[in-house]
Image: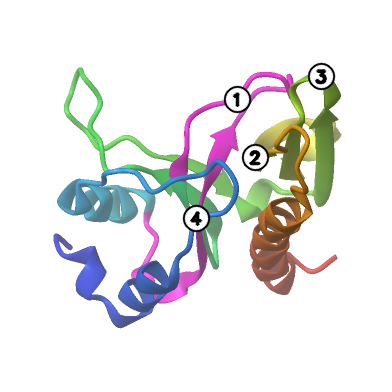
Amino acid sequence: MTDIQSHPNFGNAYHRLRPAGREQPQKIDWAVYGEALEAAGLPPAGLRALSWGRFSETQIAALTEGTTLIGVFDEAVFESLGKRHLFGRSPKYRLIDFGQVRAFAAEDYVVEHHRLHKFCIEFNGYGGVLLGRLEWHVQARRFADSRPEIMATAQERDRVLEAVDRILGS
């Protein structure tokens, strides 16, 4: 599957994609992205939502990673920029397998001294172990009304959360 963008389900979702907050589109090697999807066993027909966001596997909310392309599929959340591992040259990707998810929830964090708002979806497995966190960030402007941008960023998180909820239920 070298031309993932030609798949109607994936191509339509990608072309409707709009960045929110601080999340900006990144360069993607689509051939490697398609290889990563195949390696993960995720068919493009199972795509339910696509978003520019951040993916974290750490329990520390203060640690953040760069913007990446996040896909919600019927079986999992998939994250990749279509890059390869340095050793072995296999495609780099990360998953949150829905078969391991026992709970998921929207979480909001505000770092007031930086005026940073983080809108997240956290996925927990057995024993409350964090399987992963999806994040969308927005930084409020000083002495200006940032409410429209903050609400648009929260709305993007909620759009992805609705896709997850349709698959996993509440």
Q: Amino acid at mark 4?
A: Pro
User: Measured from the top left, where is residue 103 in percent x and y?
Assistant: 82, 49
Q: Amino acid at mark 3?
A: His
Return the residue at label 2: 137
Q: Is residue 134 magenta?
A: no
Residue mark closest to the camera, 1 vs 4: 4
Extent of the magenta region: 41-68
Circles 1, 2 touching at the beta carbon (< 8 Å): yes
Mark 1 or 3 closer to N-term? 1
Mark 1 or 2 closer to N-term? 1
Residue 154 position (above or below residue 112)? below
Residue 122 visible in the picture = no
User: Measured from the top left, where is residue 60 in percent x and y?
Assistant: 73, 19
Q: Which mark is residue 64?
A: 1
Q: Is residue 46 magenta?
A: yes
Residue 116 position (above or below residue 42)? above
Q: CA distance from mark 1 to mark 4?
A: 18 Å
Q: Which corner quadrant holds the C terminus?
A: bottom right
